[in-house]
Every structure is written in structure tokens, then in C-alpha cells.
Image: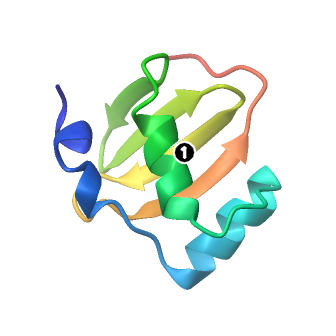
Amino acid sequence: MNSLIENIDRLHTTEMGMERIKKNLSLETEDVVQWCKSQILNPNAIIKRTGKNWYITTGNCRLTVNAYSYTIITAHICHQYQA
């Protein structure tokens, strides 16, 4: 298990981050953090750490999480990312 999964309860985002994620992914949910947690905990999620960030690819989106603060920075719809 990696430290992102071990610290999933520390996952959070800023107000600006929440709006950015909702806009980028066209999400209707009010609980963006919980939605992101469920994506990260998805058994099919591909989780990779590069430098100071975790990159999580699941379904058709890619989340970026700071590896030190566990802040969800952004999310984007993707068609296919290399893992």
C-alpha cells in the first residue's frame, strides 16, 4: 500500500481547487473530496508518484495530489494517459 492510500483521510482541497475540479470534470457533486477519495480507492485506479505529486488515473480522469500536504490540486478529463 502506498502513502496516499494510507493517508486518504488527510485528503483535502481548497475552495478554488474544488471549483476547478468541478468545472474540469463537469461534476454535479458538492462533496468533491469524497468523490476524489472514491476514485483513488477504486481498485482499477493507476496511482503513480512523480516528484512532489501523486497522479491518479481512473476511468476517464486524472487527479493530481500533492504528496506532502495531500491537497488535491486539479483534475482533468483524459482519453488515455501513459501510466
Name the spot of residue 24 as percent of width and height, x first.
77, 56
Quarter of the image that includes the N terminus: top left
Q: Is residue 66 left or right of residue 17?
A: left
Please tell me which residue is depicted at 58% across the width and 16% down the height of the picture: 82
Amino acid of disc 1: Leu
Name the residue at 41% across, 52% down: 65
Residue with the mark numbered 1:
63
Query: Residue at image x 64%, y 22%?
Result: 81
Q: Quadrant of residue 80?
A: top right
Q: Quick check: 67 above or below 29?
A: above
65 is higher (above) or lower (below) than 60: below
Residue 29, above or below 19 = above
| Near-viewer residue (62 or 53) | 62
Q: Position of residue 52 (x, y in %)?
A: 30, 50
Residue 74 x %, y %: 58, 58
Give the left or right position of residue 22, taking residue 64 as reference: right
